[in-house]
Image: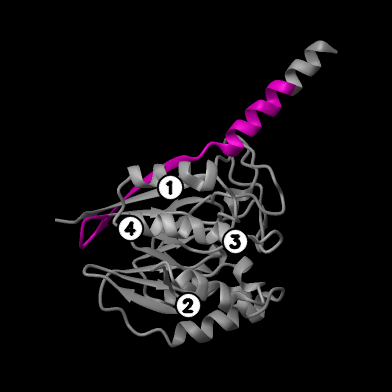
């Protein structure tokens, strides 16, 4: 009985620690420029440290040139706009922040007011828009759920239509697109790198396997997490930071992705 209790307490402590322990995953990517980017996705209104100070401090230490946020800053089930704005305020003091919409943003009927609230913080909100920097362009796509929350065929048609109207790129193009399973459509806008989230790493990562489940893909999703550098266009899927419907992550620490672009010879 005592042994079972000790094992239970130890396992609980192990999972809770890893559920709250943010790790940094680093990737190096050749590009026509040198720069550092932080990718944070799927915060879902979570907090790391009081007012997310711990999380912001960790990001600040990485000294990024840009911060990429491909959606689900809020959670539609327990939305806290004030908290979302607070972290945006702090992140915008570190580097330019680029934010595209996730499926949780798509569910909010008062999204325009929320975005107007965020815009006061110099956040670059990219809704099927391109922001051009000195060395690259960043394109943010509205999530496919803005087309339909349920029907995959309508989502695909929605994405296909708007991808047709994206202008040709002038520079190295980074695409922010929330749900990675639409990769085959995203490549149509000629990106050089795609960054996504949404999957939460498959929520439960069994040792030596991929993630267990991702919304929109089901069990053992192909697009679960990590750097897919062998595809036609490289794709990074962040495991994300916050919980959503399932409150616990297993063998799947919340993640900050750090991308070091290095100049090709
Ligand atoms: Fe999502």
Label 4 sits on a secondary structure element that is loop
Residue beneath disc 1: 56
Foreground mark, 2 or 3, reads 3
Query: Observer-nearest residue: 125 or 134?
Result: 125
Label 2 sits on a secondary structure element that is loop
List the single residue furthest toward the top. 2
State the CA–CA distance, disc 3 to disc 4.
Answer: 20 Å
State the CA–CA distance, disc 3 to disc 1.
Answer: 17 Å
Residue beneath disc 2: 127
Instruction: Please say if 34 is above or below 252.
Output: below
List the single residue furthest toward the right. 1
Asked if residue 42 lies left or right of residue 66, the reply is right
Q: Earlier in the sequence, mark 3 or mark 1?
A: 1
Residue beneath disc 3: 74
Asked if residue 7 lies left or right of residue 175, the reply is right
State the CA–CA distance, disc 2 to disc 3.
Answer: 16 Å
Q: Earlier in the sequence, mark 4 or mark 1?
A: 1
Determine crowd level at label 1: few under 14, some 14-19, many 20+ residues with C-alpha closer than 10 A.
Answer: some
x, y percentage for residue 198? Answer: 58, 59
Q: Is residue 58 magenta?
A: no
Q: Which residues are magenta?
A: 9-35
| Quadrant housing residue 98 | bottom left
Determine crowd level at label 3: few under 14, some 14-19, many 20+ residues with C-alpha closer than 10 A.
Answer: many
Q: Earlier in the sequence, mark 2 or mark 1?
A: 1
Whether tag 3 and tag 4 are in contact, CB under 8 A, the answer is: no
Residue beneath disc 4: 95
Label 1 sits on a secondary structure element that is helix
Q: Is residue 14 magenta?
A: yes
Q: Quadrant of the C terminus?
A: bottom left
């Amino acid at each position: 009985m005592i042994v079972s209790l000790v094992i239970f307490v130890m396992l609980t402590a192990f999972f809770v620690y890893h559920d709250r322990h943010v790790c940094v995953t680093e990737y190096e990517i050749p590009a026509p420029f040198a720069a550092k980017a932080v990718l944070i996705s799927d915060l879902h209104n979570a907090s790391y440290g009081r007012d997310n100070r711990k999380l912001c401090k960790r990001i600040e230490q990485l000294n990024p040139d840009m911060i990429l946020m491909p959606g689900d800053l809020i959670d539609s089930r327990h939305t806290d706009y004030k908290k979302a704005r607070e972290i945006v305020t702090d992140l915008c003091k570190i580097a330019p922040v680029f934010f595209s919409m996730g499926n949780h943003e798509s569910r909010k009927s008062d999204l325009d007011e929320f975005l107007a609230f965020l815009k006061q913080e110099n956040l670059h909100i990219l809704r099927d828009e391109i922001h051009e920097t000195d060395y690259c362009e960043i394109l943010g796509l509205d999530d496919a759920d803005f087309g339909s929350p349920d029907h995959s065929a309508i989502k695909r048609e929605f994405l296909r239509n708007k991808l047709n109207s994206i202008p040709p790129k002038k520079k190295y193009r980074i695409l922010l697109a929330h749900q990675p399973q639409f990769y085959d459509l995203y490549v149509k806008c000629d990106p050089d790198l795609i960054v996504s989230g949404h999957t939460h790493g498959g929520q439960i990562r069994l040792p030596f396997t991929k993630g267990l489940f991702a919304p929109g893909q089901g069990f053992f999703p192909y697009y679960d997490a990590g750097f897919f550098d062998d595809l036609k266009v490289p794709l990074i899927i962040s495991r994300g930071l916050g919980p959503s419907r399932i409150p616990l992550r297993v063998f799947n620490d919340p993640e900050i992705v750090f991308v070091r672009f290095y100049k090709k010879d």
